[in-house]
Amino acid sequence: MKTLVRMVQRHGTLSMLCAAGVLLAVPFLIRGNDYLLRIAINILLYSVLATSLNMINGYSGQFNIGQAGFYCIGAYTAAILATRYGVGFWLALPASGLIAALSSVLLGIPTARLRGIFLAICTLGFSEIVRLTILNWIEFTRGPMGIPGIPFPTFFGYEISSNFGFYFLILTIAAVTLFVCHRVLNSRIGRAWIAIREDELAAKSMGIPTTRYKIYNLAFGTFWAGAAGCFYAYLSSYVSADSFTLDEGFAILCMVLVGGPGSLIGPLVGAFFLVVLPEMFRFLAEYRLVIFGLAILVTMHVRPQGIAGGGVFAAIAPDSEEPAGKGAAS
Amino acid sequence: MNYYLQTLVDGIAQGSIYALMAIGFAMIMGILGLVTFTHGEVIMIGAFAGFYALTFLKTGIFVALVAGFAAAWILGLVIELICYRRWPKGPDETWLITTIGVSTVLKSGAQIVLGTEQQLVPDVYTGFWTLGGVRILHIQVFMLVVLFILSAGLWLFLKKTRTGLELKAVSMDKTAAALLGVDVRRILVIGNAIGCALCGVSGVLLGVYYNSVHAVMGGSAGLKSFASAVLGGLTSIPGAAIGGILLGIFENVGVLFFSSGWRDVIAFLILIAVLLVRPSGLLGRKGAEKV
């Protein structure tokens, strides 16, 4: 494993090309098998979602657990634009992202000062409010009936209607997401986020307007969740508030935590594991979230930085510090 | 007029449940300085313990309350073992993550083991008094009495016993307490168990008052206990009690004006407002860095 990691580090471009080749080849290998294609699509969709959450939780240290709410906003924006105003996929995609980002700014302005569990509960409450609003605002969202009949997306006149086409669509979205995230993280603003995560006071004294940057961070992260929601709406051609419960948010959070927050590759690994694992054990389908919860606990106890992480949580490996009151206890 | 008085009475009764939850929460977060996300699930487990005591063992309400207390106490011990023991110093995020893990396991596990449908809790104390057109249920008075007895017990425990004193010392400064010979780990275990046990009792009351328990009741209950504790000031136990009762009143008044579908939103809006306007809550210590 270690040699593999070292090899990847040494030949960055080459391994990227290899990965791209594999990802492009996969759908041709499993073309006839809709089930496998669907799993591959889900892995990529959750990769985008986990990456979007990782931008927030992993890089600026704001603990957001309500990502499902923004995912939901994106999906409903796309659904309403497509069915009511006849907007095409390629316009709905950035629009969903922007609406999700805008709503996160609305949430961020009052809550950017909060940290830890306070922010966590606020994002959780926001996610619930989004769902309740959609359920109760029947004239606009059709409430519990959901919005059916979202048309297939088109690409230069070619209609994407098969899983094969959707695979390439989400692959493109995932690649763009990762590329943009990578570039932003290595820019001035991304470094500012990391500085805030490491020590907010120090970042502030170095001249970073922390509150503003935290709101930017929230907006940037939720933009991709909104875009993923748009893809989801087109993929299933039907949206309903039931698909965006808190459990969905916890599933996304779990992928980030298990994969490794604070690294770009971590959420991808987490999404892969946590989509494939329940599929491998179909008889445990009911236990999906129990598995997720246990995965979080096992990760925290065994490898707190996550499978592929080395960033944020490396410092809090168990027993790294003399625990309080140890002297008195023994 | 009677209508509003009735709302007030119902609000206070409901608030007494929230107060109990919030006291438990303030115990864990404010006094011990731990972060917990499992609160709602502890309430749910307590409610189910009370429900099984009432229906299968056919015991009275008192045994049900004790069952809820005991089940939540044991759960508190388990939570401490899984979530806090290895990271006695935090940081907060670690506790948050581990307790989210436990909460997810408990919630989804309960849906599988205990079923997803609502269970009907038998009636306890069905009578009521009528006072000037306002109906006061016996169970409402009973809930207030339970709240008073438990808070008095907690107050005596904190004031009169050695463990209670040690608990207050730990709340002020963990390191200094350890230097003076206080076994901090033991105090964390006991304090966390007490906090959880109070929530277990509130869960039983919640089930009895609404005649129903279900596996996902923890979500909104947890949000309410958090909102009440923040409203009262996280570090203060009387504050938590007042915050809970106020939240109960606000909620019932709010439902008068909006539909009941928005009940949970009211608690959330109050939470946001308090965090914005006065983060230390009504009776909280000023300058305590909690936010």
Image (tube, grey):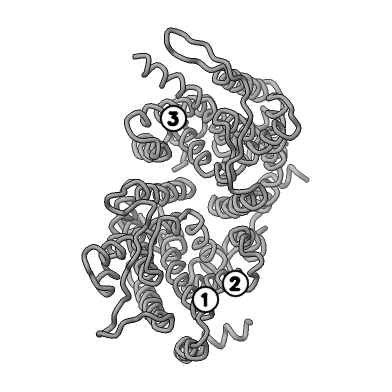
Parent chain of label 3: B
Query: Mark 3 and mark 1: span between their CA atoms?
Result: 45 Å
> What residue do we see at 48% from left, 73% from top?
A42
Parent chain of label 1: A
Label 1, residues with CA under 10 Å away: few <14, some 14-19, many ≥20: some
Point out residue B60 in the picture as x, y percentages from the top left corner: 71, 24
Q: Are marks 2 and 1 in contact (CB under 8 Å)?
A: yes
For disc 2, the marked residue is A279
For disc 1, the marked residue is A39
Quadrant in the rendering for residue B198: top right
Q: Is residue A142 visible?
A: yes
> What residue do we see at 53% from left, 28% from top?
B19
Nearer mark to the viewer, of 2 and 3: 2
Point out residue A68 in the picture as x, y percentages from the top left corner: 43, 58
Label 3, residues with CA under 10 Å away: few <14, some 14-19, many ≥20: many
Point out residue B118 in the picture as x, y percentages from the top left corner: 58, 41
For disc 3, the marked residue is B247
The answer to whether residue A26 is above or below residue A176 is below
Depth check: give the residue in front, A109 or A29. Answer: A29
Query: Mark 2 and mark 1: span between their CA atoms?
Result: 8 Å
Please count the marks in the image.
3
Secondary structure state at the residue bearing disc 1 = helix
The three-letter code of the residue at mark 2 reads Glu
Depth check: give the residue in front, A316 or A28. Answer: A28
Secondary structure state at the residue bearing disc 3 = helix
The three-letter code of the residue at mark 3 reads Leu
Label 2, residues with CA under 10 Å away: few <14, some 14-19, many ≥20: some
